[in-house]
Image: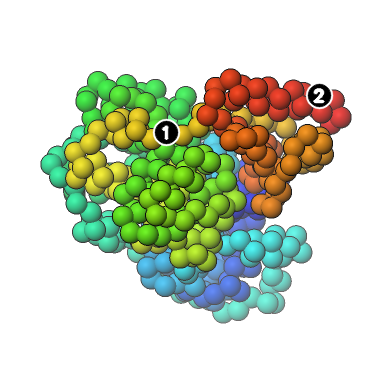
Amino acid sequence: MVTFGYDIRGIYRKEIGENFAFELGSILSTYGKRVAVGYDCRTSSIHLHNSLVNALLEGGCKVVTIGMIPNPVCYFYTFHKKLDFGVYITASHLPSEYNGFKLIRGDGTSFTSELQQIREALQQGGRRMEERVAQGSHEVDIMADQEYINHLIPKFKVLGKPLIVVDCMYGSSSNMLRIFESLGCRLIALRAKPLGDFGGIRPEPLEENLTSLREKVVKNQALFGVAYDGDADRAVFVDDLGRVVDGSKAIAIFCKYLLRRAGKVVISIDSSIGLEKIIQDLGGEVIWSKVGHSNIEESLVKHNAIFGGEQSSHFYFNDFYPFSDGILATLYMLEILTTSRERLSRIVDSIQLPAYQKINLNLENTERRDKMFELLKQRLAEKFELNLELGYIIFRVDENRVVIRKSETEPFLRISVESYEETKLDELKQLIMGQIEELSKQL
């Protein structure tokens, strides 16, 4: 089933194919006429790209195609050029058999409410041929990635010639490593070749996928390591001891650097509750948000926040623009570590947060997922005072917290449990899993 959560995603040809892309392009041509289109390295992306562009041209759009580039470059191009909207073809961290479309507003945020309108239009058959107007115009810009690099490099100060290890996971970041070399960095690049099937891996920087990165950082005494997902809007860091840096700890590191002036910070609700005190002690104000890049982006703009972060290691630096950017996050980490002359491991160890566990529960399809969510809500309401404001199940037991939410892109329930006491963490986890086991009989 095609999902319309934070963007549009589905299985190529089975759910999303060239006809889908053409109908989508026809609908999008009513949202503006000045458009940028880019795509990731999936084998299917160029085919969807061509169909989409043809439809946009039939709809009278002035289309600039910017080629195979990382997601942040397409967002940057749309934002920097003040276009009506942009389209980036990707399924982010999902396996290569998936693909989809991220739709970008001119202010650098993503389509949100518009997605439901587009979904309804697609269900009604898109735009009829007689509604389509004269041919638009097509321009190719092969310098979009260099323009992005030229914009960022002067903004950062990197001392010395630090050695970093970068894992591109065969994704679209593979052609962008020159940005770090331009700042004097020495590089060890892993899986730094864009492959249409991501070399058979799921291009997601989870700890179990980062064994080689961790080993290379330690063996070569690198300053740090970083891994990007398939479209490079996420950055997961590895410290100098080879440990994967938790998303919430990375948020804390960036906040300590950025909150040298007072400001607001937008944090996804599945991030550590301990961040609240850290940010407040720095003079900042925390705004909790629903998970997902489109939700964080809108909240950043609405509250004029200086930074946003998610537990999944999406980082948003609103002094530049409101969308997440793994490459920009790496530039910030380079500046922080080389100017402070601190080891990342020491900074990580100085940050005290509750113990945290995340459970990804696969319910096989969205109907079972939704039913389990409702059953859990009813059962837990009998035992705890639930906060349902964001559409999630959230409850606290003393200083401990549980967050349960439905994935917007997969048939999963995402469950996060945190506590300052390991024993309490295990108790809460067992309580939730026990309820799920019992309720599964009703599915």
Judge from the rendering whether residue 191 lies leftward or rightward of residue 59; answer left or right: left
| Residue at x-position 49% and y-position 46% | 276
Q: Quadrant of the N terminus?
A: top right
Furthest residue in direction right, as rendered: 442
Locate residue 300, reporting x and y percent. 48, 60
Amino acid type of the residue that numbered disc 2 sits on in the rendered structure: Glu
**Mark 2 → mark 1, Cα distance in angstroms:** 35 Å
Picture quadrant of residue 193: top left
Picture quadrant of residue 127: bottom right
Furthest residue in direction bottom, as rendered: 134
Disc 1 is placed on an element classified as: loop
Specify which label sits upstream in the sequence, 2 or 1.
1
In this orientation, does residue 430 appear? yes
State the residue in front, 7 or 344.
344
| Residue at x-position 71% and y-position 25% | 431
State the mark number for residue 215: none
